[in-house]
Image (cartoon, grey):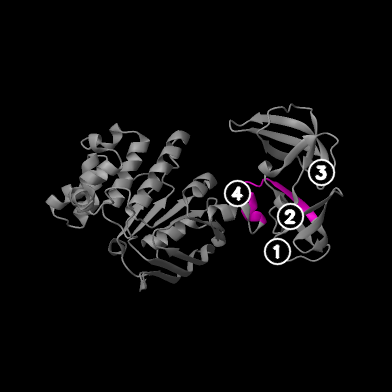
Amino acid sequence: MSAQLQTDPRRSAGIGPATGDRPAPRIERLRIRALTKQFGELAALSAFDLDVRGGEFISLLGPSGCGKTTALNCLAGLLEPDAGQIELDGEDIVRTAPERRRFGMVFQNYALFPHLTVERNIAFGLRMQRVPNARIGERVTPALDMVRLREQRDKYPAQLSGGQQQRIAIARAIVTEPRLMLMDEPLSNLDAKLRIEMRTEIRRLHQSLGLTTIYVTHDQEEALSLSDRVVLMEHGVVRQVGTPREVYLEPSSAYTANFLGARNLLPVQIAALSGDRVEVATTTGITLTGRPRGAFSADEAAIAAIRPEHIVLHPAGQDGINTLPGAVQEVEFMGQGTQLSVQSALPEEIIVRTDQDAWSVGDRLTLQFPPDRLFVFPDEGEG
C-alpha cells in the first residue's frame, strides 16, 4: 500500500487521498454563538447559533433575504458582525483578517480572472500565499485532475462551459488546502442537468478531501441531497437544524413544512387532544386527526399540513379515518409521477403527488390523510 500512496501526486501535494481512504478533517470544531448583524433597521442576522463538527457538510437554506449569505460572509471575514463569537478549534476568529483565516470560498458568479488561463486561475491563491513556483506546480496539477480539467489547463475561462468554470473556481479554493470551505449558491447559474452533475462533484470532493463545508442555497433539493445537516433560516433566525431526513419528515413548524414542500396547509381549530394525536376542525367543518407539533389547548387556532406525496388516493365512495370525497380538477405529468389538483369539501384545492397514471380531469375519488403524516402546528401566519 505504501508504495502507491507515497508516489501518488495528490498525496505528496497534500490535495487528497490516493485511493478510497478518507482523510481526517482539517478542523475539529466550528462554534458560532449569538452572531448578529444589522443593516440600519434591518436585522439581517439575529443571535445565530451553530455547532459544526469537522468533516460535516452543512447547508444554510432559506429564501432570499433570510440571512444565509450574511452568515457566510461573517464567517469568511468579509462582513464584521455587530455581536457574537466565531470559534474555530477554540480560537476566536471574529477579528481575524479574511486572508489569515485560511478558508476557501466559491462564489455564485465564479469570480474568475478572464485574462488568466485555467492553470493560472487555480494557482492564483497559492501565489498570493507566496508559495514557491515549484511547489505551485505540484499542487495545481493534482487539483486539475480532481476536477477533471487537466486537458483544459491552457484555455481561458471564456472558452469553457459554465460547469467547467465552476470547477475552476472549486479547484482554486481547494488547492489552498482550506481549513473551511464556504460556498455561496455556486450552482444557481447552471442549467438543471449541470446542477445535478456538479452536486455530485461537490459532494465527492468534500468527502475525498476531508473538507468541512458550509454551503448556502435556496434550493431545497440541493440542500437535502448534499448535506449532513440542514440549517433552515427565516428573517435572520434559525428555524430548524437537523439531518435532511429530520427536517423533511419531521418539520418543527408550519414554516419548515411549507418551505420544504408540504404545500397543503389548512387553517384549523383544535377540537380535542389525546396523547400523540390531535383532532382538528377545518373552517368548512371537516374533522381530521393528526400529529401535534407543539403545545395546544382546546379551540386554539392551528395549521394542519401534509405533503402531496403522503396523501393516499382511493376509488370514490371509500370510507375510513381522515377520508373525504373529491374531484380531479387538473392533472400534470411530472416525469417521476403525476400531480393532481383535487377539489373537495376543504376550503382550498388539495395537491396530490402519485405514481398512478389512471386519473383524468373530472374523475371522482377519495382522499385519505394518514394521521401520522398530517402534522398540526401552532398558527404562525404561514397558511
SS category of the residue bearing label 2: strand
60 or 37: nearer the eye? Answer: 60
Magenta-drawn stretch contains 52: no
- Between marks 2 and 3 in the image, the one whose residue lies nearer the viewer: 3
Q: Earlier in the sequence, mark 3 or mark 1?
A: 1
In the rendered image, which residue does mark 3 sit on?
Answer: 323
Give the residue at mark 2: 303
Residue 94 lies, with reference to residue 136, above or below; the image says below
Q: Residue at x 33, y 37 (%)?
A: 164
Q: In the shown orientation, is residue 301 left or right of residue 83? A: right
Give the SS element for disc 1: loop
Q: Residue at x 54, y 59 (%)?
A: 242
Residue 81 placement (x, y as % from top left): 43, 67
Alpha-carbon neighbours of circle 4 within 10 Å: few (<14), some, or many (≥20)?
A: many
Q: Which residue is mark 4?
A: 260
Q: Mark 4 near mark 1, Cβ–Cβ under 8 Å?
A: no
